[in-house]
Image (cartoon, rainbow, N blue to C red):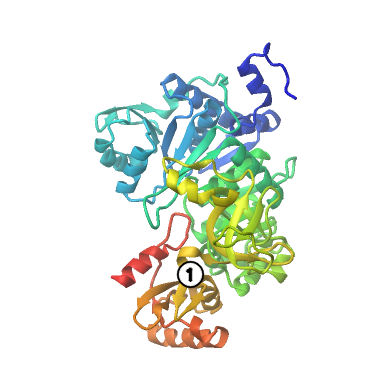
Amino acid sequence: MRPDLSGVDPLEFNLATRFSVGDMLTRTTALFAGRTAIVDGDEEITYARLDAASEAFGRGLLDAGVRHQEPVAFLLGNSWRFAASFFGCAKAGLVALPVNLMLAPEDIGWILADSGTRTVVADPPFLPLLEAVLPSLPEITTVVVTGDEVPESIAGRPVRRWADVAADPTPVRVVVEDRDTLHCLYTSGTTARPKGVLTSHLSVHVGVLSNALQTGHRRGDEFSVLPIVLPLFHTTALDTLLLPILLTGGTAVLPRGFEPEGFLEVVESRRATHLMLLPMMYAALLASPGIRTRDLSSVRLCIYAMAPMPQERIAAIAAAFPSAQVLLGSGQTECVPATVFQWPAHQETKAASWGPSTVTVDTRIMDAAGELLPPGGTGEIVYRGPHVMSGYWNNAEANTAAFAHGWFHSGDVGHLDDEGVVWFTDRVKDMVKTGGENVSSVEVERVLLASAEIVEAAVIGVPDDRWGEAVTGVVVPADPDVDADALTGRLLEHCRQHLAGFQVPKRIEVRVGLPKTATGKIQKHELRDEFRA
């Protein structure tokens, strides 16, 4: 059965029925116009101001000739104008393309070329980067720069002020379909060129609703307050942190970088309710004097991701934030995170697990032949549900592999237990094959991190004539002046007590730091390349 809509204007019907992320901000503003949506340094941006700026920026882009579903690249740091630019694109039916600012100029130039970008929005600090890549990108014709004083041109391209583009706040009225692409986020390209992940309004909107439910955001007077220090160009900060806050009328605080004492000041003074930090950041907080003197009782939930944490550190975080649960959330760019999230009960019983699926995701385990495995069977973690991306941009081969057998293939290895809880073993590419045995790098890292003498660890396989691959650990000590040889000896003995013989590293190297992505994931491919060289 289908309705007869022949007498209904298509735009009017779309406005009345759509599932657009741009409308999310409009609805929140209708209820909480005067509430602070974003704290950006010394500025407090209300919902009314953010929504009006978003409408104006979207209208300005359309007036400048940006076409429906055309990408608009962001070279933007964390700021309220990032959010306004993002929602402006969403309202106008354009594709937001936040660029990973940690990538090399060569990769950024490749992304801008691969995506067919004609319009770039940039903060002044990133203009030298833009100037370096523009000569090889003749298709880019429009450059918009935030700030009051901007150059007249960059690499021969005329420059417009962000405020001049966002001049007319009259609401945008254009068709935006639920399955239109909302954003294109390029992967970090750890083994090949970055891949552009296209994600729809529907996928992100469902993911945002799921995240708000999982993390307990409250919509009325007891709204959430969340400091965000991870970069907004990444799906975690954007889709998992910022958007659920703005959906529910909360306040996002954008500190200038991460410094433990300053962050604790923000948590206390703003009465933060939720935190999302990387394990290394939690370690820095625990080592900070303020952790023992500040009132941190407002925090209800401490989320961590990207790397495992030893049980001792989880317990220490729970003690420092006495009203909070400490839970792990997991996901990936291709499947709007979080896809799995621990329940509070898992804090004690299954802290090493990923937790069960979120309410709108179906998670299973598949073998190499495409058969789903029963509980306990180890294979690739696969997903179904509205969180899943629309596909990779300009990459048919990758799409064929990603959607084989009617499931999205994550590239992660793990198993489900009898309660549907996901236990992550390793990335397929990070498994170490040594002496005929498969070793989970994550399991060895968890044992290493249980030592109070180290704060970070990475385990990789290094080519070896005898073993095929030798299990190799790279660690960062808590005490930078520690005797490296003595520490290595103690860590190896610790591993022998807690691991099978074939899992014990053949070598452990002590470093002052590890290579990481912008969101703190250790770049094991760089370590492997270094050791192989």
Quarter of the image with the N terminus is top right
Query: Looking at the picture, how far across and down is residue 325, in whole percent?
Result: 69, 61
Query: Looking at the picture, how far across and down is residue 472, in whole percent?
Result: 42, 77
Q: Residue furthest top?
A: 7
For the question of whether residue 254 can be seen, the reply is no
423 left or right, relative to 460: right
Q: Nearer the viewer, residue 347 or 174?
A: 174
Residue at the image point whose x is 63% and y is 63% from the top = 354
Residue at the image point whose x is 61% and y is 37% from the top = 202
What amino acid does circle 1 point to? Met
Using a 10 Å C-alpha cutoff, classify the residue at mark 1 as few (fewer than 14 neighbours), some (14 to 19) or many (20 or more). many
In the displayed structure, 121 sits above or below 282; it is: above
Residue at the image point whose x is 50% and y is 88% from the top = 493
Query: Regarding mark 1 in the picture, which secondary structure is present there?
Result: loop
For the question of whether residue 387 can be seen, the reply is yes
Quadrant position of residue 474: bottom left
Q: Nearer the viewer, residue 525 or 216?
A: 525
Quarter of the image with the C terminus is bottom left
Query: Looking at the picture, how far across and down is residue 435, in whole percent?
Result: 44, 81
Query: Looking at the picture, how far across and down is residue 309, in whole percent?
Result: 57, 69
Quadrant position of residue 221: top right
Q: Residue furthest front?
A: 369
| Disc 1 target residue | 431
In the displayed structure, 318 sits above or below 82; it is: below
Please tell me how many numbered marks the rendered image carries: 1
